[in-house]
Structures are given as C-alpha cells and as structure tokens.
Amino acid sequence: MGKRKVVPIIDLFAGPGGLGEGFTSVVDSQHERHFKIALSIEKDDFAHKTLTLRNFTRQFPFKQLPAEYYDFVRGNITIDRLYSLYPKQAEEAKREAWKTTLGETSHDVVDQRIRESLNGARDFIVIGGPPCQAYSLVGRARRQQAEGLDKYDPRVYLYREYYRILAVHSPSVFIMENVKGLLSSKVDNEHIFQQLIADLENPVASYKKLHGEDNLTSDCPGYTLYSLVKKPSKVDIYDKPVFKPSDFIIHAEDYGIPQTRHRVILLGVRNDLKKQPGILQKVAEHVDIRRVLRGLPKLRSGLSKQPDGNDEWKQALRSFPKQLKEEIDEDIYTEISKTIDNITAPALGRGRMYVNGKISTGYEPDWYLDSRLDGISNHETRGHIIPDLHRYLFAACFAKLRNRSPKLADFPPSLLPAHDNVNVGVSENKFADRFRVQLYGHPSKTVTSHISKDGHYFIHPDATQSRSLTVREAARIQTFPDNYYFCGPRTSQYTQVGNAVPPLLAKQIANVVRDLLL
C-alpha cells in the first residue's frame, strides 16, 4: 500500500489561523488529516502567538492534545513551560508559523522559506486573504470615500504579494478571501476587482508587466477561477467558465455559519489540472445564535471608572432613570422594570480567561466541544460606563419585544450619548445602528475587528446580562472550536476573532479542494 498523500498548505496573511483550522480539520475515516500547514505567515505579534500555539496542537494526532495543553489553558503553566515539555513539537510549530510582513520582507527570503517548507512537494495549495481594511465598505464610508481608494495606500495592492507567490511557486489550487467591498473598489476610476481577476488568472504575465521580463523564471500555466457557490452559466471562447463578480460572494449564513457574513472567496485551479470543482451545499435553515451561545456561562458586565462588584453592578442597573418612562413605549419600559426588579448577579461574575464548569452547545457539539477542557477560555467581560449599561439594557429589551435592534432614532433622546455623529445618525440615519443587539432567533450580524473597539455593535441579547459579547462568544459565532485559545490582551483577541475566516466554513471549502486533489 502506497504512502498516504497529505497536501501541504502555504497560508498567507494568516491572522489567528481560521482558514488553516478548517483545512486541517478535514480527516479520513482513520482520523488522519488530508492537509498540513507547511508555512503560515502573519505580521501581528499576538495573532502570530495564537497561530503558533494552534500549530503546536496540530503536531499531535487529531483531537488528541496532551494533558499539559489543558493545564496551560487553565492558567496552571505558562506557554513557555508547555513548549519546553514538548520541544520537538514546539520547534516544528515555530518553524511553521512565521512572523513577517509580506510586502516588506525580501522576495528572495520569502521564496526561500516557502521552498524549504514545501520540501519538494509539487501538489500544494495557497490560502489566505490580503488585509481588507482598504476595501471595506464601512471603512470607506467612515473615510467618506464611497468608491475611490487612495492608490498610495500600500494595503490596496497587497494582493500583488499573493499573486507573485502564485507566479513563482505555482500551487495546484489557491483560495483567496476578501470583503465584499472589493467588488466596488476603484483606483483612478478603474475597478480593482477586474484587475485582480486578470492578475490571478495570469500571475506570471502580471508579475513580469510590473517587474520586467528577466525577474522571473516560471512554468506556471495560469489559473481558472471558480465560484464556490455557483456553477458557471456559460463558457467563453476559450472554454473557460464565466462568472459575474457577485457569483464569488459567499453568504456564510446559507452554509451553517451563525452570522450574516458576506465575503468574496475565489477558488483558483491551475490550468493543467483540467478539473472543475464542486460547490458548497446550502443548509436547510439558518442557525440561530441562541443555539450557538447556549451552554456558555452567564456573566455580568463590568463597571469602568468606578468600584466594580456584584452589588455595584446591580445598583448601576437599578439606577436606570425613572424619568425615561415618559420617553419610552410602555411595554418596553415595563420589560426594563421587570428585568431590573429580578436582576441577580451571575455566579461567575465577569468571568475570567478560564472559567471552570460544564460547557455545552446547541449546535454542532462534535465541532465545538472538548470534554477535556472542563470549562471554557477567553470568556470574560469588559467594563462599561453606567450610561452604556442603561443603553444596553434598553436595547436588549427593545429587541426582545420588537424582534429587531433599535436604531438611534428609537432611543429616548436623554439616553443617547452626546456625540456629533450620534446626532447625524438620528437625523440622517447614518450609522444609525451604533448600538446593535444580536437577536435570538437569527444569525448574528457579521463579527468584525470593530468588536475590539467598544462592543456597542455586539450587545448580548440577554438583557439580564446587560453587556457586549465576550471573546469566546464572538469566537463561537465565528465557529472556532472551544479549545482554540487566543493569545494576547483582550483587545487583540477580539481583533483576531473578527478578522478570521470562520473555520467551519473553511472546512467546507477544504472538502471541495480535497476532491480536486486527492
């Protein structure tokens, strides 16, 4: 019997490793992985630490982590101690996770590192998504750039680092992910997406056009691009599939991901493979976040800029201004009053980096749960000023009764913060969902890196907790398994989660790629 084939992965702009987690979770009947991370590249220090730690866990058989890993998660040993107990696995994990900045590091250095990681493998894949802030619709609106991008912003053209690696190394397949705003982004009145497609289909020609004929020797035959959610309706004169730009948008909620995350994801197949991939299969119904959050311990919000304790927290909620009764619909004020009258502080208070206890979920338990954890990590709340607690309380009670999150115009005027952009939000309906409750009965709205800022866009639907989501709750919505530990301060943990590709979606994509190569 021949040696089993394992396909190496080069993960570019890897973040905390959401795409890689999905690919390395595809196993055969013997629980052997079909894909292996050969190299993952990330520039952010804390995301790189998370990436290295997760790569460390993959040095062990699938779902057979060492006992000391759980000791680390519980805070009983340091990460350095964990690595010292398994030096071989730690060394390999650190080799696989490379902290460097694509676009700044020498191409020769990058290429050498990739070749060493591949160790002669001819069938391999490249995955990843260049940083998307430049293309983000929300970011452009905040910068008042509805269409045109700053052509001098280096992030606009970071995708060139991606196609340069395709040109030089010629992977069998690639997956590129980015925000939906990429489709409408323009530089000098030219659509970025059209140029990106041309560059990815013919990376060698595009690279030579930029850098000259003598700078590259490559036998890469180019790529055919496919949608992961739609079959081509026709082919062009060269017998290549034809897609509309919108065909490349994946609505994650249609594929079992508990959030309305809409992203552009491109699948490129090297032309000499001459294979047409399958597509993702839709689920029968969308996933309610109640199912995903079920089984996580209840927590209270913290109090910032004042003493913080259970009694102080209850008193803060009970100080909800009674005069607002005249400004709020009667049924909503009654719900607020009932919530306050029955308020009790959760047994675990604000939570901690590790919370001991029985954990469950109402969705995909085999994916999320790890019985050996005996608890949950990254589950602690942040502090809020008392007026924000009152806003969260109002918003959650409003959402419970109206089955929608309130707009700024729905808030009683005296409960709104005194910010100029709030007044614009009320009068012009611009960023009017500044305080946004995630609704039971529906998928969450998109979890983004903005969750690291203040939590106003990610209010927990349970008014009795009166808070924003924890890192672990956001990670569950993003479909990270519970034993996926996020390193760094809490702000960075939120950013890592928000920037990631949902691993459970990545696993489905990986199954499509597996069928192409194995």
Image (tube, rainbow, N blue to C red):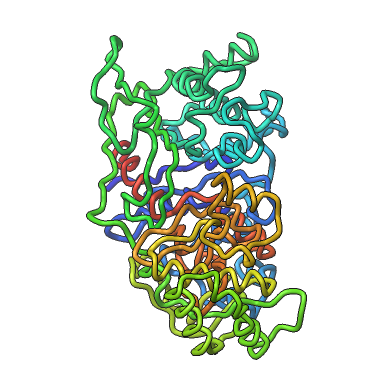
Pinpoint residue 60: horizontal percent, then vertical percent. 48, 63
Asked if residue 37 is positioned above or below residue 54 in the image, the reply reads above
Q: Quadrant of the C terminus?
A: top left
* Total tally of numbered discs in the picture: 0
Asked if residue 341 is positioned above or below residue 400 in the image, the reply reads below
Asked if residue 318 is positioned above or below residue 121 in the image, the reply reads below
| Residue shown at the point (55%, 81%) measured from the top left | 355
Q: Is residue 69 visible?
A: no
Q: Nearer the viewer, residue 371 or 468?
A: 468
| Residue shown at the point (36%, 61%) measured from the top left | 442
* In the image, farthest residue toward the front: 326
| Residue shown at the point (46%, 61%) measured from the top left | 405
Pinpoint residue 507: horizontal percent, then vertical percent. 37, 51
| Residue shown at the point (45%, 75%) measured from the top left | 330
Pinpoint residue 193: horizontal percent, then vertical percent. 49, 25
Is residue 366 toward the left or the right of residue 56 in the image? left
Q: Nearer the viewer, residue 223 or 111?
A: 223
The answer to which image quadrant residue 51 occupies is bottom right
Pinpoint residue 227: horizontal percent, then vertical percent. 34, 33
Q: Is residue 354 visible?
A: yes
